[in-house]
Image (tube, rainbow, N blue to C red):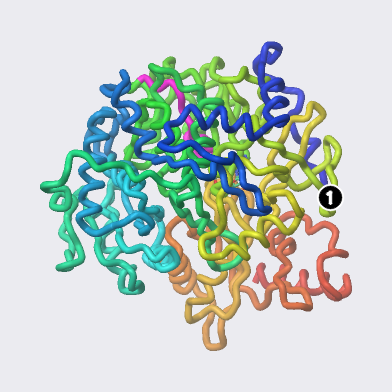
Amino acid sequence: MPNSEISSLPVDEKYFDDSSSNYRAVHDSSLKDSEQFWANIAKELSWSREWDEVLEWKPPFAKWFTGGKINASFNCLDRHMDSEQKDKDAYIWEGENGDKRTITYAQLYEEVNHFASALLNLGVKKGDKIAFYMPMVPEFPVAILAATRIGATFTVVFSGFSAVALADRINDSQAKLVITSDGGFRRGKILKLKEIVDDALTKTSTVTNVIVLKRAGIEINMEENRDIWWDDAIKDTDDFVEPEQLESDHPLYILYTSGTTGKPKGVLHGTGGYLTYVYATTKWVFDIKKDDVYWCPADIGWVTGHSYFIFGPLLHGATSIMYEGAPDYPNPERLWEMIDRYNVTIFYFTPTGIRALMKHGNELPQKHDLSSLRLLGTVGEPINPAAWRWYYDVIGNKKCPIVDTWWQTETGGIMLSASPNLGLVSLKPGSATFPLPGIEADIVDEKGNSVGLGEKGFIVIKRPWPGMFMTLYNDSERYKQVYWEKFPGCYYPGDYAIRDHDGYFWLLGRADEVLNVAGHRLGTIEIEDAMVEHPAVAEAAVAGKPDEIKGESIVVFAILKKGYEPSEELRTDLFNHVRKVLGPVATPEEIHFVNMVPKTRSGKIMRRVVKAVASGTDIGDITTLEDGASVDEIKKTIDEFRQSVKS
Ligand code: PRX
């Protein structure tokens, strides 16, 4: 296992003194009797029936708090109605165009009840699936909470995804309702969301209704008997809808994420375990206090938006900022201006976002008073030390700890991070520090043996935790095979990691054929499939190359079909084609026309070679690369490939 990264880890740079941290003691005791540990936390939520068993573990399937009954919307809203949270702002919203709105917990409760009543009027029942394709407006969390109130399972499709991606997800989840808006604002332009929904619905057959929120005020097509305006749907609805008392393992949501095949994986989360985990981790990591103003700008389309924009903060009765638009619109000081305007105290952002804003220099953030900030966070990808230091020095003014949180769609919540609530451990720029309480993590080699400090390996989780996904929707075989077969008995997240001489964990990126572009997961095969759907493309190989801002960017090598010649027009057409099929998040950085792509004898693309050529780095040891081919053959193949990239 190459471990060249270790020498570049700034392991000796430490921030904050951890001599009084409770973290280690809590972590140790959490693992001694983890079921009791989790049960004590679950008791801080409201259950209408207590569980019979904390954990039913039939590897690799875990059921948490079996026999217990709980409702997410009740825990996020009703619970606060008898407390001082009632009149506190749940959301302070700002539209990209400067529109502003605040919503107290009492108002949110009211809106959620009316919308839940509207859903019932449309015949939506417990267990039905609702797909969301929405801009970041307050009605988005309203409708999600309403869905959870009646026990409907929701699936959010990021509004940057294409009609094809939306249709695939509707078909896989069998959604019967879509909730969208006429349009949304992004960088001053209007995203025509309803038009995309209309297009997607030509490829689906399960949807009986579409609820449309008026946001952009544009002309749209409304199909009779199918499409209903939001305002009409909530007319004459009830003030109160009894929250469904749901089994703890009732499916709360399905969130699709990329894997190593062309078909996205439907990550299915339950209710009681998930809420318990998100509640606990929000407390440990963000340590939200009564007067905090918390801001996680993640779109609800990603798991971060689910766990730490919607459920975590609401369970704690926190005040959150919600922003509709792009972080650099109309200029790259928008976020700093908003932190100043709303006195944000906790800010949870992405390394890509930090790097993108950092390139504009210190002047823009320094124009604003950021002194309200007390805690900073990052998520989605490894943060390079330079970006970490800038975030720490310039945004946090050298006084705010940075919690680097490592987790995944599948894990439901943060797995590794420093925990200010338990007493901060000293921080190192670029390290997610340690596993949270209840999480037993290790780093292992190919054979599943623990590696020593300083040796790179695969991170694994050695026991179930309440936030873990229940399965892949409609595909339990794939669930078993992808996550549990590589290291039997352990959850395999698919990331490389290393521990330094102090035992700190450093996450080193994906170990599988998944790219992380600006914190978004994209399967290389998904992009290859999209490419070959174009009539001119016979074959394609995709790899990531390091990108200063996005962490990784997409490079495509395409072999054209007979009769097609490389040209700039075709290249542009292919860029547009990928955007259309997968959405703008998957736009390649480079498309190269080649005569061949290096393959093993069994026909598999030599990923390491393609990646090295894309990044212009050394291919390294090729003796183990292929199955059966000689090293000479591979070298020849690589040379030919390189040659054809040049030409
Ligand atoms: O490779 C890891 C990276 O993002 C992957 C999970 O992506 P997704 O399911 O889309 O969830 C993103 C938001 C939780 C992981 O397998 N990743 C996430 N956070 C970090 C990270 N890599 C390094 N450091 C992190 N803090």
Q: Residue 397: where, in percent of width, then height?
A: 52, 17
Q: Quadrant of the C terminus?
A: bottom right
Mark 1 close to ligand 1, CB under 8 Å: no
Give the extent of the magenta segment.
343-357
Q: Residue 92: where, in percent of width, then height?
A: 30, 29
Q: Residue at x 20, y 55 (%)?
A: 121
Q: Which residue sits furthest bottom?
A: 563
| Residue 265 visible, this orientation | yes
- Secondary element under disc 1, as helix, strand or loop, is loop
- Of the pair 74 and 478, the residue shown nearer to us: 74
Q: Which residue sits furthest front?
A: 52
Q: Amino acid at mark 1?
A: Met
- Residue under circle 1? 1
Magenta includes 356? Answer: yes
| Residue 576 visible, this orientation | no
Q: Residue at x 88, y 70 (%)?
A: 631
Magenta includes 161? Answer: no
Q: Residue 258: where, in percent of width, then height?
A: 55, 58
Q: Quadrant of residue 545?
A: bottom right
* 581 to 81, vertically: above or below: below
* 145 to 208, vertically: above or below: above
Side of 267 relative to 345 (left or right):
right
Q: Residue 100: where, in percent of width, then height?
A: 23, 32
Mark 1 crowdedness (10 Å alpha carbons): few <14, some 14-19, many ≥20: few
Q: Residue at x 53, y 47 (%)?
A: 518
Q: Quadrant of residue 97?
A: top left
Q: Residue at x 33, y 37 (%)?
A: 323
- Of the pair 364 and 280, the residue shown nearer to us: 280
- Of the pair 33 and 362, the residue shown nearer to us: 33
Quadrant of picture, ligand 1: top right
Side of 512 relative to 308 (left or right):
right
